[in-house]
Amino acid sequence: MPFSLSSPLDMHIHFREGDMLKLVAPLSAKTFAGGVIMPNLVPPVDHISRLIIYEEEINKAIIGHGFQPYMALFMRSYTEEELAPIKDRIIGIKLYPAGVTTHSDQGIKRIEDINRTLAIMQDIDIPLLVHGETTGFVMDREREFISIYERLARQFPRLTIIMEHITTKEAVDMLDRYENLHATVTLQHLIITLDDVVGGLLAPHLFCKPIAKRPEDRAALLHIALKAHPKLMFGSDSAPHPVSKKECCGCAAGVFTAPIALQMLVELFEDHDALENLQAFVSDNAKRIYEITPPEKTVVFEKTGDVIPDKYGDVVPIYPGRKLAWNVKVEGEIW
Ligand code: NCD
Ligand code: ZN
């Protein structure tokens, strides 16, 4: 029997710029109704003028698809004069601690330095999106950041805070502890552990930041995803890099999942008898948390024998060559 989703959303997506954007943005726009566009370009998207140009570039690439890019600014110290007039043009501001991930060198060195900006965001209702990792030991980086989430949640109780791409059971526990904390989770962190990345032959296409963790962490993430915890949203963190930057010494962090993320989520939720919760996980929770109304789009899934391509352009996706249980068809492409 076919299965359908209405206006699925990807609440954390990397589109890049130029030719890469032209390749990957339509692949997301085909099946998703909208997505939160990450601002970690070089240089970062940290001025409204740059954000507008970037948004135009995206809109040009996805024309005809009925996809709403929700634009995020890169965190620095902002004044109220800067933020108040552009509040409705942005979905939030993304905080990258300096040096924790791809193109985060311009990130924040001391979080106390942006207290004033965070207070303004709380006052005028701009959500804070956070890459929650320290620069400590790789398996502990998210756990070490939990105390920073706690401080932020307490100090700014009316600030909507999104813990991006959570990977640990400690982060899962935070959702029920602080009213203003929410989270996104990726596809890969629901299905892999560190073992899949480095336990056998090294798997560069499964390497991302934050790194996949232990089986008990994955189990905790899967548990809240399958029940569509009301404070959890799907955010693929699909992060394309050319094959030359992945299959080399010094492999770039990022897993490319966008074109098959929904199909694999349907399979995952079906396998766990939880298909009825997928709509909330991939759309309804995000609509409520961010108070957004994305374009209407019905995405229909049918059983298939399709195989994940080896490459999209110059980018290798997660699980090339793997058979997909579900195929996707978009209805109502009227744009
Ligand atoms: C992302 C990228 O390549 O931009 N990489 C990743 O491993 N997730 C950055 C990020 O979201 O951390
Ligand atoms: Zn990301």
Image: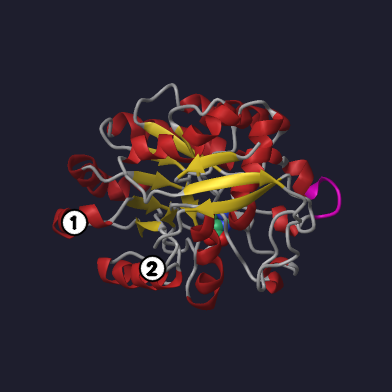
Residue drawn 40% across and 30% down?
150
Residue drawn 79% across and 49% down?
198
Q: Is residue 282 above or below residue 179?
A: below
Q: Is residue 209 magenta?
A: no
Label number found at residue 59: 2
Name which residue type carries label 1. Answer: Thr
Q: How many marks?
A: 2
Q: Is residue 241 left or right of residue 93?
A: right
**Which residue of the protein is positioned furthest toward the bottom in this rendering?**
19
Q: Position of residue 316 (x, y in %)?
A: 70, 64
**Which residue of the protein is positioned furthest toward the right in this rendering?**
200
Q: Is residue 188 visible?
A: no
Q: Is residue 200 magenta?
A: yes
Element under disc 2: helix
Q: Which residues are magenta?
A: 198-202
Q: Is residue 40 above or below residue 134?
A: below
Q: Which SS does the magenta portion mostly show?
A: loop
Element under disc 1: loop
Name which residue type carries label 2. Answer: Asn
Q: In the picture, which quadrant includes the N terminus?
A: top right
Q: Is residue 53 above or below residue 88?
A: below
> Quarter of the image holding residue 278?
top right
Q: Position of residue 290 (x, y in %)?
A: 33, 41
Residue drawn 32% across and 45% down?
293
Choose between 34 and 53: the one closer to the eye.
34
Q: Position of residue 301 (x, y in %)?
A: 61, 45
Instruction: Report, in whole angstroms, how far the alpha carbon at label 2 lies from the one at label 1.
Output: 28 Å
Choose between 27 and 168: the one closer to the eye.
27
Q: Earlier in the sequence, mark 2 or mark 1?
A: 2
**Which residue of the protein is positioned furthest toward the top in this rendering?**
177
Q: Quarter of the picture for ligand 1?
A: bottom right
Residue that carries the numbered disc 1 in the rendered image: 79
